[in-house]
Amino acid sequence: MAEKDKKEASGGKGPGRPRDPSVEKAILRATVERFIADGYARMTIGDIAADAGVTRPTVYRRWANKHDLIVDALDFNFQEERERDPIGPLEDLLPADALGRALRYAVPYAPPGRGMTVIGHVLTETEHNAGLLELVRRHAIGPRMQPLIDTLRRLREEGALRPDMDVLVVADMMTGSIYSSYLRTGDRDPGLADRVVAALWPVLADTTASR
């Protein structure tokens, strides 16, 4: 590596131009695409740089290694998906409609989101890189599950759902059925969330409230 490249790769700062945010976004998006196409072990900084239209030193000037890069890239991807797919207000919806919308948001497998694909690749890496799964928990699954959990709790407190309902168990059952259906069939059924809610509603609803 040339002396200039070594300096850039080590993060050395000179009197050059300030960083261009569009370059960083291009690198992060290229990283996610490579992760989906090749997996963590096979993807290389060289391929990522080529895909992003930059040089390897440009990448290393921002990230010290591949692990740091994929962590930021996945976080960036999850944030972009949440911004493209806002959940919107749920309080004014009918209870079953609110649960259906929250469930669809919790499992982002419909285009343009690629949450299922990314999570699948992360699961294949857990034996060698457990930190990636923790990242997915904190930055993807957690933020998307929270509206569903909050909605279940709110509806329980409002008397629409049984007071003895275990919110976390129900949330896992609802999202688990979506994942299970996808693994079993390979289909991305946008109407499945509403059918899951309809199937569970007779068990979850507080029938004593109407007596």
Image (cartoon, helix red, strand yellow):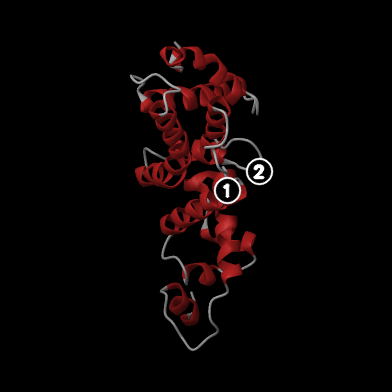
The location of residue 70, given as percent across then percent down, is 47, 54
Q: Is residue 112 left or right of residue 118?
A: right
Q: Secondary structure at mark 1?
A: helix
- Name, please, the residue furthest toward the bottom: 15
48 relative to 87, above or below: below
Disc sitting over residue 112 in the figure: 2
Tag 1 near tag 2, CB within 8 Å = yes
Estimate the x, y position of residue 148 in percent, counting from the top left: 47, 34
Q: Residue at x 60, y 56 (%)?
A: 30
Could you tell which of marks 1 and 2 lies nearer the N-terminus?
1
- Crowding at label 1, few (<14), some or many (≥20) Cα neighbours within 10 Å? some
Above or below residue 201? Residue 28 is: below
- In which image quadrant can residue 192 be found? top right
Viewer-nearest residue: 43 or 200: 200
Residue at mark 1:
81
Residue 52 versus residue 88: which sits nearer the camera?
A: 88
Identity, as a three-letter code, of the amino acid under mark 2: Pro
The amino acid sitting under disc 1 is Glu
Marks counted in the figure total 2
Quarter holding the C terminus is top left
Judge whether residue 184 can be spotted in this image.
no
Other residues around mark 2 within 10 Å, as few (<14) / some (14–19) / many (≥20): few
Q: Quadrant of residue 163?
A: top left
